[in-house]
Image: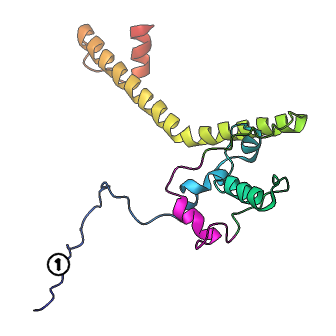
Amino acid sequence: MRCTRVALRPPIKGPQTDGPVRSPVMRMGFQKYTMKHNTMQMTNYWEYTINDSRRAPFWVSDFKHRYLVRTGKEHTGPMPAQAINGQYPGIHGYQLLKYLRDFAPAQRETRRLPIVNVSARVVYEHRVQLKDEFYRTYKANQRVLAEAREIELFQWYGKMQRVRGKWCRAQGVTSRGIYTPAVDAAEIWG
């Protein structure tokens, strides 16, 4: 008995349409900012520092618990930057994010995190960050605003031409000669 291959569909020709499946082709570095485990890179430093209800990384509580079980004391020193190898048997540190990135991040720890003193420097940095965010949004909306202004102008001009045509017909004017629509508008609306 011969094994038959499954016939593949021929490639779609012509203009591509956006279907329910996302295109696998991505721009360079685009996925860096869309992955769920990269939320801290996306967050501004001061926002992350000042925000009191921020979450600790998912492995921090496990690390502290293991330390407590091993030594009988609370862990007070600085935390390592990543989950250390051997913390989760059979999984390397760099693989952890790969496995866990599609799941909801762990809840923050129960104990309150320290609040940053509201010094002049913190206030200044926060203000700078808000300004940057505002201008980022403004730049993103520039094209939309320009389009809206253009559409508004075209709508006004079309309305003016309609009123002008009606007025010219009512006055029995067949040709305005050298006069422009703006002159007629001034005559109609004052």
Q: Pick the residue in front: 87 or 158.
A: 87
Q: Residue furthest right?
A: 120
Q: Pick the residue in front: 112 or 188.
A: 112
| Amino acid at the residue labelled 1 | Ala
Q: Position of residue 40 (x, y in %)?
A: 66, 51
On screen, residue 182 above or below 4:
above
Q: What range is drawn magenta here?
A: 85-106
On screen, residue 159 above or below 115:
above
Q: Is residue 30 visible?
A: no
Q: What main secondary structure does the magenta stretch of the protein show? A: loop
Q: Position of residue 142 (x, y in %)?
A: 56, 39
Q: Is residue 79 left or right of residue 175?
A: right
From the image, tell me which residue sits under label 1: 7
Q: Secondary structure at mark 1?
A: loop
Q: Quadrant of the C terminus?
A: top left
Q: Is residue 159 left or right of residue 32?
A: left
Q: Position of residue 11 (x, y in %)?
A: 24, 72
On screen, residue 116 above or below 4:
above
- Residue at 58% x, 56% y is 37
Q: Is residue 90 magenta?
A: yes
